[in-house]
Image (cartoon, rainbow, N blue to C red):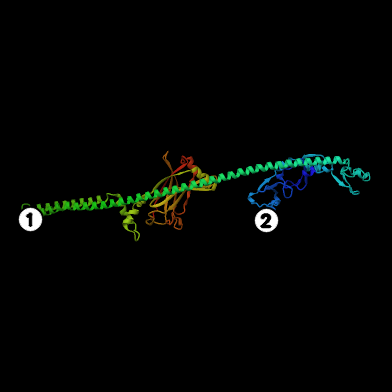
Amino acid sequence: MAVQEQRYTLFGFSKELDWRPLHFVDSIPAHRICNACGLVHRVTVFLPCRHVLCNSCYAQCLSDKVHGCPIDGDPFLEEDAQRGEFPLDSLLKRKVKCWNEDKGCEMIMAASELHQHFHEDCGHHSTRCPKCSACILISNVRAHRSSDCSADAQLDTAGTLKPDNDSSQEAVLASLEAILEKRVAEVRSGLDQLAREIIQCDKFTELTHTVNDLREVVIKSSEEQICAANEAGIDVAREVKEDLAWQGDRLNEISLRVTTLSEKVEEVLREATKKPLEQSQKKKDELCYDGTADGSSPKKVSETVSVFEGTMGKASEHARETISQMPSSNTDSSSVSKTTEVPTGVNPAILTRDYLPWFSTLNVKHYEFHVKGIKLLKERAMSNGYAGSYRGTTYLGGYCISLGVYLKKSGSSMSVHALVRLNKGVIDSFLQWPFSHRLKLTFIDSSKSTHHTFCVATIGNLYDKRFDRPTNTANDGVCSAAGCRIEGLEQQGYLRSDEFCVKCELLVSNAN
């Protein structure tokens, strides 16, 4: 009976051992045996109800819409089932008895050696006698047939005597006691393992709750930071708008003062030259009638007065020009108003107040910015094949432009390209669209006063919507085709403190 309790049928391990009962010297752990079919499979599945199924029985449970344990019917989710594997090396090291144990073979060996022993070394193979149908050893066939089927007729009775009743009962009791001890040990082992698994599950549940709490805290903190940043951005935008409005009012006030001053100066000059001219004309008339002594005197006086009048006229004109050129902002606003068309229905006073500060950006052609975090940007490019980052937004030639760099992986090397995006600007209605200018980007090494131009590209395409006037906040970004190897820039020392210093220059096209 003890022998039967330690006999197991394997499958999924090897073709030599599968589907043949093996008598193990030591019991197989309970969590390796399928509770449904009793077989030992290499792959087992642990259900939430603590039952163990082999891979075949578990697949039958998944065929139904509602997955349920075949032992107690408890439903379960597929993701809650845990798979376990019986290592082949561990199984092959376990001690087993020969398949011919009931024929008298007493060999005990590792499971990996059983196949070779049974087929090559074991001398207890048996057969049925064709004459008497008795089970005899192959090695005793000759003696059995020579004795007319009387020698070694049955292996189970040869060489043994039947014990008396008392000894049989004692043997049965001893066997039962041994079986009970083994079963108790197995139950204790299973309970200990179950307790350990319950503790692990409790720890895992506690860890899950902790992670969820931490995640909620991080999300809440991120939302608070985003709200604070948005509020700060709104406040800064409001202050900038108010400051620009104040500057516009100041410019209007200065323009009015300059106009008034010019009119007053003209009036003063007119009054200042009027009286000398009248006196000179009077003297001229008197001399014309009182020139009897010297006939050439009236002519000389007339020439002198004419020269005086010309000098005074030039001085007056020079004064007007000097006064009109005093405030450069007034001249710029006049030239802008002459070259741009005022939108229909827009009050010129409102136009001057709201747009005048931004017209100064028409003459801005240069912008310098820093691209930080190059190491992290390179890691993203090595992982994804590309990575881009905007690091500056400015007005160039009146256009609101965001600038950055774009890293592209090509084999084992990596190249740097210009990244440009057109944003919605204040004076877009006064600019030429689509955008068709050229941008020149230059790396700068301030420590050595050196530079490296890496991209001069025509940014603009009449058939590309990304260069039309932005209708939303911004258009999609554009990456230039031209670029340079980032390894060369690093070797030349343009990468310092994990950042690049880049200068962008707007090259106005000939069409403009």
The residue sitting at 31% across, 52% down in the picture is: 249
Q: Do the residues labelled 2 and 1 touch (CB within 8 Å)?
A: no
Q: Which of 352/484 is in front? A: 352
Q: Which of 451/166 is in front? A: 166
Q: In this view, does 153 lie to the left or right of 465?
A: right
Q: Tag 2's secondary structure? A: loop
The residue sitting at 74% across, 42% down in the picture is: 183
Q: Residue furthest top?
A: 447
Q: Which residue lies furthest to the left in this view?
A: 293
Where does label 1 land, which residue? 289
Q: Tag 1's secondary structure? A: helix
Please count the marks in the image.
2
- In this orientation, does residue 249 appear? yes
Q: In this view, does 455 lie to the left or right of 327?
A: right
Residue 467: where, in percent of width, then height? 44, 55
Residue 64, labelled with which disc? 2
Q: In this view, does 372 lie to the left or right of 27?
A: left
Which callout, 2 or 1, points to the residue nearer the camera?
2
Label located before the other in sequence (2 or 1)? 2
- How far separated are the C-alphas under marks 2 and 1? 136 Å
The residue sitting at 46% across, 49% down in the picture is: 419
Question: Neighbour class for label 1 at 10 Å: few (<14), some, many (≥20)?
Answer: few
Residue type, mark 2 in image: Asp
Residue 493: where, in percent of width, then height? 46, 40
Residue type, mark 1 in image: Tyr
Residue 274: where, in percent of width, then height? 16, 53
